Amino acid sequence: MHGLKRARQASCEALAADVKRAQAQIRVSTAGLERTTLNAPFAGIVARITGEVGEYTTPSPPGIPTPPAVDLIDDACLYVSAPLDEVDAPKIKAGQPANITLDALPGQTFPGHVRRVAPYVTEVEKQARTVDVEVDFDTPPRQALLVGYSADVEAIIERRDNVLRVPTQAIQQDGTVLVLGADGTLETRSLKTGLANWAFTEVVSGLSAGDLVLLSFDQEDVKAGVKVQPKAVP
């Protein structure tokens, strides 16, 4: 009788051991499954997947970067990142107003403001040293924007309204412009300029509103004293 009782007890202990072993195997399988699952840290768009179904990725040797398994894009809050010449970086501060233009939406300018100025200078292949600047849209454009659009940013350091201006490309290196005279010939004018950017330059003196200035210097024979015909503007 006692022997039968011990046999049953031993059988129960064996079954309990089998249950513990099965539970341990479940935990091992669960841990292995977790290692094969990627959880996105935010909602977004999957732009690229590196690898194939069933393929395993292992850590790369030192010095050889492993490409990311998934490129995930967060399109909930779009901003523009642009390189700025290090010479101009001290003039830019977070919060300054800026204008944003997009190559995909010509003729439109979107107001924004500087959200961040990188605290370091970037040097790419011995080219110009630049500082990365990030600019937010003040009001999101009505058009759907795609991540990766080409964009230009103009930070507004100082502003003046209702002033005389000329295209910056019309000003020669010596600070003069070629103006169409009353007799149809070109004449040289020296300018006193104010604010300027890559597009326009403020004229303090030297020109009057309505003066016609030469914009292109492609032809070598076009110089002061040459008789020219103004090009009709469409």
Image: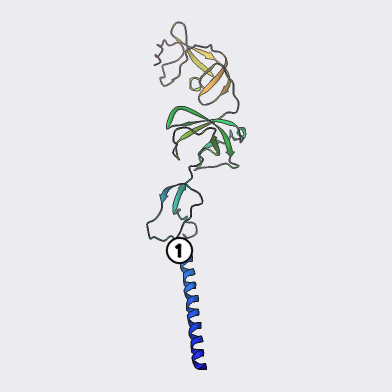
Give the residue at x 45% y 49%: 71
For this view, does 7 lie left or right of residue 161? left
Name of the residue lying farthest toward the front: 1
Give the residue at x 50% y 94%: 1
Q: Is residue 141 above or below residue 63?
A: above
Front residue of 84/156: it is 156
Q: Residue 92, percent across and down? A: 60, 33
Q: Count numbered badges in the picture.
A: 1
For this view, does 8 lie left or right of residue 231? right
Q: Residue 109, percent across and down? A: 49, 28
Q: Is residue 33 above or below residue 230?
A: below
Crowding near pointer 1: few (<14 within 10 Å), some, many (20+)? few
Q: Is residue 167 above or below residue 16?
A: above
Q: Quadrant of the C terminus?
A: top left
Q: Is residue 137 above or below residue 191?
A: below
**Which quadrant of the figure has residue 220?**
top left
Front residue of 29/130: it is 29
Q: Residue 24, percent across and down? A: 49, 72
Q: Which residue is mark 1?
A: 33
SS for callout 1: helix
Give the residue at x 43% y 30%: 105
Q: Amino acid at mark 1?
A: Leu
**Which quadrant of the figure has residue 232?**
top left
Front residue of 147/118: it is 147
